[in-house]
Structures are given as structure tokens and as C-alpha cells.
Image (cartoon, grey):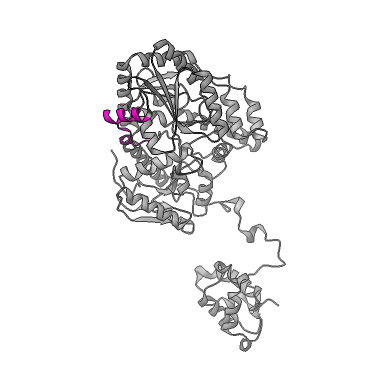
Amino acid sequence: MILKNKELSMTACIYFHPEGYSTNVEKLMGRHAAGESFLEGYFQHSAFEGPIYVHVDEQKHSDIFESTARSYNRTENIEAIVKNQLGNLRKPGTLHLPGPALSEQALRRSLYGNDQWSLTGITHTTSSSTAMDSISGLLVNPVQPWDALICTSNAVKRNVEVVIDANMDYLKNRLGASNFSLPQLPVIPLGINTGNFSYTEDDKVLAKKALNVDPESIVVLYVGRLSFHAKAHPLPMYKALEIAAKSSDKDIVLVECGWHANEYIENAFIDCAALGCPSVKVIRLDGREARNRKIAWAGSDVFCSLSDNIQETFGIVPIEAMSAGLPVVVSDWDGYKETVRNDIDGFRIPTIAPSPGLGGDLAHRHALGIDTYDMYCGHSSSLVSVDIAAAANAFHQLFISPELRKKMGAAGKSRAIETYDWREIIKRYEELWSELSSIRKNAQAEYQGQVKNPWPARLDPTIAFAHYPTSHMTDETMLGLACPRSEFTESDLANLKNLKMISYANYIFPTENEIATVLTNASDEMQPVRQILRGIEPSRRPYVLRGLVWLAKIGVLRTS
């Protein structure tokens, strides 16, 4: 049961950039679909009573976020937190990121205090150099036990642990390190809005007409990016379909509802299908168009995804297929192992790969820039085999038995609704945010506090370059007016400040009142800075002291 306790915050501030939450992008990836779906689920099912917090880089992003919230009938105030208000994250208590980059945000938080709020992020692919660097950074950046990297499957959690363990070994050997502060690694799957995948019998009839297939034909569906090197090599599916089509004596149609990155890949799929399943009619739909996806889901009888790629971590599409009431044929690979119950929701087809330790050259080629990331994925997936005979047998059983298709489809649909609907997943997010809040609050009493330089790669420039100048401005530095008071007017100062090469840096200017106080205290005679700063508010004194250097720079004060 979730308690609406504002002392243990159930909410989080959502870091929002439109690129991470929209499928309306040129290069559509799984993370875009996951982000868009998460935001929809969050607005529909978040239970927190209070303002909705969003962290944005630009105000226009906040406007887009608010517009999206209103489209889901959320009436709460939208409280935007921008870069120069980062301390306001103390109010929601957690910042949620749409990716795994906790390290950068942990460093930013360190400027305010490592115990001031929690951070949560989520894994998508973990095979890219960027993702692996993010995971490695968890060990050397100020990530805390009240933070969490959400793993979408136990498979990806194990991969994260392998990368962390390897980095621990490296740091122990290199630096003798022994004390590591790590985030939580909870497993929370991706969710879907299962109501989006409900189709009536009339929908199904109309969809088959739209596909121009015979009502008695059995339609097998693949949905998603069509990439033989980065998603799923289609040859095992093609060959298995050809075998099953002949053994079952059924008219089989394959619908590939997706998109190719380029014409070369598109032609490669066409050639492979012609060779691998010449007896199977192949229909290709642009899966980026919602109408095509609806036709594909409603008009299909069986779903197939024989993923063989290391960049896959969870795989949301089989859940969508289950929600649509389709039996699924998937590879026994990564997150599919957890989402699809073999012989219940469909069939998981065995996979085999080389023994651990036989791919070091692939990693080295990628690390040295010999191979692109795409080629790295392609080489790796070329060494993963999906059992074609087992896939053919699974298809055969489903093709000859409408009862089995119906039984498995119904089981999968129930599982999708009960386990993977955002209504259930958002609860788990909110429970996590509450738990992290509790861990952080309990730890604050014993927390050691700030180190001298919380972000050592972003040092105060007056410290990092302290040896550059001849001297430093201190309380004892002697200053005087650069010219007699009678010869310098307010308009002279205004003219200086309005120069483009001066005004661009107005952030460092003292206020008008502070400048007036300084100029009143200063005189033609030299006197120590502490005298010139008389009457300045203590909290502002350091900023005005450094501002004296600026006044000397523009020729208002003199140091000799």
C-alpha cells in the first residue's frame, strides 16, 4: 500500500528534454518510445498530491511539459526548476532522469550537498561506450546509497554489476581503493498502457482487409526497428517460417512493421527474405506511423522477435504483443527471459553464444575506433545463434492450432495487464522514491558533509589559477579612486557598463547600491579594502570584494 506521506516523498522531479520523451524524432530508438510511454503512464497514474516538478534546461521545454500534463487532465501546478535554481530540488527530494547518467547530476548536486536530494536514472542499452562509461563513473563520482539506477530486467542488472565489478578491480589495483559508495540497483521493468492494445473482432477483420490478406491466412508480425546488426537478424525467423509454412500447409504472411535506417539495410532485408522464406508473403509497413501499427497489431495472429543483440536490454514490444492478445515467439535472450513465460504466453527459443572470454578482440576494435558501435554490435550478434529448428517447431504448433493461439494470447494479455501496465509500474517508481527518501533522511545525521573540492574537475578558477596574477585582492589591499571624484560621474560609470565588451559579464557586477556604497567609501587617498567595504551586507561581502577587481579593471579604482 502506498501512503501519501509528504515527509517521505513519493514524487520526483522529472528531468525533461523533449528529445528523450518523444517518438517524433528522425532517428527513432527504443529509449524514445520508452520515455514517451513513461511520461504518459506517469501523468495517468502518479498518486502524489501536490505540484508536479520538472527540471528543464530551457523554459520552452517546461511549456511543452505542462502542455503534455494538461492533455492528460493533470490540473496541479507545474513547478519548473531551471539550472540556476538547482537547490529547489530539495522540495521534491528526488530528480528522475530518463537515462543512466547519474554521475553528471551527482557532481552538480555536490555543489549543494550530496545529501540534499536523491537521483534516479534508468538503463536502456548498456552496450554503448557512453552507457558503459556512465556505469563506470558510478564508482568515482559522488553517487550515494540514496540514489538508484533502475534496471529494466535482471539480465541488465547483471550486466551493470559485471561492469561495476570490473571497474572495482581496476581501481583496487590502480589506487588501492577499497571503499565504494554505490547506488541501489532495483529491477523495475518498462511499462505500457495496455488499453492502447485492445482490439475488437471487427478491428481484426478490418485490419486483415487493410493488409489485403485472406481471412484464413495466418499473419506473423514483427514490430520495431528493422536492423540486422543492431536489433534482430531476420534470417532465423525467415528460415523457421519457411519450414513451418511447409510443414503446416498453411498460407503464412509475415508483416514487418518497422523502419530501416537506410536503403542499403532495406534492400538487405528484401534479399534475405527472398532467400530465406520464398513461400511466405512479406508485407512491409512503416512502423513510425500510428495507423500502420494499429493495422499490424489488430490484423496479426502471432508475434515474433528473435532478438540476438547485446544492445537489447528489456524488449518492450513482446509486452505490447501480449497486451494485444497475440501468442509470442521470442528468443531466450536478455529481458525476454523474464517477460515471456515459455509454453504459457508463447515460446522462448534457445540461443547459444561463445563461452565468456572469446570476444576481447571485438571490444578492443571498438575501443580503438577500428569498428563503429554499429559494427561492434554486428560482430557480437553474428556470434549469437537462435535455434531455427526450435523456432520452426514453435511456429508449427501455433499455425496448426487456433486453440493454442487463443490460449497463449489470453495468458499473455492477462500477464501484461497485471504486471506491466503503467498503473502497476508507476506504483513501484513511487515506492522507490519514498524508500530512497527514507534512506537519505536516516543517513543525514551521520553524513560526513562536504569535501573541500566537491567537484575537483570544476575548480573555482581563483583557486585553480591562483598563481597566475602578480597579487590577490584581500582586505589589506590598498585601493583608491582612479580619478578625482569631481571628474567622474554616474553617467561615466553607466557608459563603461554599457559597453558590449563589459556588459556581457553583468553576472559578476555588484549591485547598483553596492557600487554606490563602495564609491562613497573610496577616496582619492589609498586605503585598505576593509575600509572600502564598510556597510556591505556580510553575505554579499565576498562578491563585492571580488567586484572591486572588476572596478579596477574598468578604471574606476586604482591599486597603485
Q: Position of residue 337 (x, y in %)?
A: 43, 23
- Specify the quadrant that holds the C terminus: bottom right
For this rendering, which residue is in front, 164 or 69? 69
How far across and down, in percent of the image, does residue 89 sit? Answer: 43, 53
Q: Is residue 316 above or below residue 69?
A: above
Residue 193 picture quarter: top left
Q: Is residue 97 visible?
A: no
Residue stretch rendered in magenta on the structure = 190-210
Where residue 203 sits in the image (x, y, percent)? 29, 31
Q: Count the marks.
A: 0
Q: Residue, x 63% and y 71% (percent of image)? A: 549
Camera-side residue: 288 or 491? Answer: 288
Name the residue at 66% across, 31% down.
Answer: 365
Report the predominant secondary structure element of the magenta stretch.
helix
Given residues 527 and 166, the one toward you in this image is 166
Q: Nearer the viewer, residue 66 or 180?
A: 66
Q: Is residue 350 above or below residue 21?
A: above
The answer to which image quadrant residue 433 occupies is top left
